[in-house]
Image (cartoon, rainbow, N blue to C red):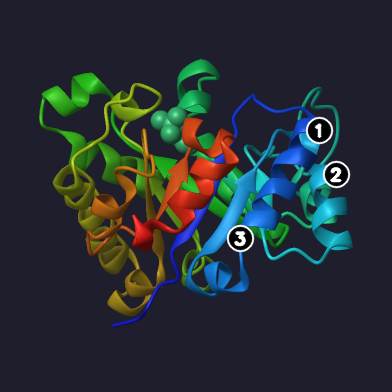
Amino acid sequence: MTTRTPLMAGNWKMNLNHLEAIAHVQKLAFALADKDYDAVEVAVLPPFVDLRSVQTLVDGDKLKIKYGAQDISAHESGAYTGEISGSMLAKLKCTYVAVGHSERRQYHGETDELCNAKVKAAYANGITPILCVGEGLDVRKAGRQVPHTLAQLDGGLDGIPADQAESIVIAYEPVWAIGTGEVATPEDAQEVCGAIRTRLAELYSQELADKVRIQYGGSVKSGNVAAIMAQPDVDGALVGGAALDAEEFVKIVRFRDQ
Ligand SMILES: O=C(CO)COP(=O)(O)O
């Protein structure tokens, strides 16, 4: 069985301007020690306008913290007002990019087809996608969370070859648990994360499925992270609100101490 390094990523959403971003990353850098980075990969996903500042700080001080964007254009360049291309993100040395976050699907009508194009755009530029999947409350109430989430997974991975898919990160984020304070139980998280890994094995191979990191996201805090991380198929967390508080995020990174 492959050991997967947990990935704790803070999705800042539309919070923290570039000055606040610098202060926040400095706080994380000050608090986190080499042993934290040995045990866990730590990443932040700031707004686009912060990325240059974060890059300058991380490069200048040789910080071990990784960073990435919250979205990517499906297009490489051209007349797409307001969009940011994968090559621009690669130039800023982004390691990760979130694709298909439920807020993008909900407020910007992003379909599985578009998410798939964005996954391809990320790989074309050497950036690792964090493909976000998960069901809304109506689907959960109907007990259809597994088929719904797996359909999003299939759609996002369509045509992605194994040599790319083996590095993908999947974030299972049940929409009803995002920003609501209502966290999925560890068993809820495991049910769907386990089903995602089984599907990856069907689509590719067991060996590949064992390598892929599957995060849980939705009201993760220092008080609930340990129980969620104890699940066999949960390999990290995609943290929203709690990632805006540096001390709290550091506690989440140190989930084994909680
Ligand atoms: O959407 C999320 C991370 O991408 C989760 O947000 P919260 O942690 O604020 O619920």
Badge 3 or badge 2: first in the primary sequence: 3
- Mark whose residue sits in front, 3 or 1: 3
Ligand 1 sits in which quadrant?
top left
Image quarter (top left, top right, bottom left or bottom right) of the N terminus: bottom left
Question: Residue 196: in sight, yes or no?
Answer: yes
Q: What element carries label 1?
A: helix
Q: Mark 3 points at which residue?
A: 32
Q: Are marks 3 and 1 in contact (CB under 8 Å)?
A: no
- The yes-or-no answer for disc 1 within 8 Å of ligand 1 is no
Question: Which amino acid lies under the numbered mark 2 shown in the image of this protein?
Answer: Arg
For label 2, the residue is 52
- For badge 3, the amino acid type reads Leu
Residue 84 seen in render: no
Q: Name the residue under label 1.
A: 18
Residue 149 left/right relative to 141: right
Relative image position of residue 83 (x, y in whole percent): 76, 30
Report helix, strand or loop for mark 2: helix
Tell me the tag on residue 202.
none
Nearest to the observer: residue 202 or residue 181: 181
User: How busy is the neighbourhood of tag 2: few (under 14 within 10 Å), some, or many (20 plus)?
Assistant: some
Pick whichever of labels 3 and 1 is earlier in the sequence: 1
